[in-house]
Amino acid sequence: MKLWNKIKSLFQKPLLLTNEVKQKDIMIKDLEKKTKKELESIGRKMGIELDRRLTKQKLINKIKFRARNKTR
């Protein structure tokens, strides 16, 4: 049994011991699937304030514009 448990432990994923939140990279194609609230929170993380009264496409365009200008 001990040998079997060792073999099983080799294939198991290690547990994370810290509660650190890792920042995810957001793909531009994934923005289409997000809700307006999610887009607003993404904008806040980027340092811009988005108005949810705008259309979803306009919110996405503002995020894209900010992302392009931030990388230059």
Image (cartoon, grey):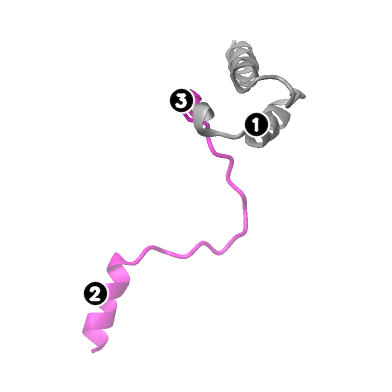
For label 2, the residue is: 7
Foreground label between 1 and 2 = 1
- Which dot marks residue 36? 1
- C-beta proximity under 8 Å, tags 1 and 2: no
Give the Cα distance between marks 3 and 1.
15 Å
Residue at (60, 34) in percent of width and height: 35
Q: In which quarter of the image is residue 14?
A: bottom left
Q: 18 above or below 56?
A: below
Q: Crowding near pointer 2: few (<14 within 10 Å), some, many (20+)? A: few
Q: In which quarter of the image is the N terminus?
A: bottom left
Indicate which disc, 3 or 1, sits on the residue closer to the N terminus: 3
- Which dot marks residue 29? 3
Q: Nearer the viewer, residue 25 or 10?
A: 25
Q: 17 above or below 28?
A: below
Q: Which of 24 and 64 is in front in this view?
A: 64
Q: 15 above or below 32?
A: below
| Residue 67 on image: x %, y % | 60, 18
| Residue 63 on image: x %, y % | 63, 20
Secondary structure of the residue carrying tag 2 is: helix
Q: Which amino acid does label 2 sit on?
A: Ile
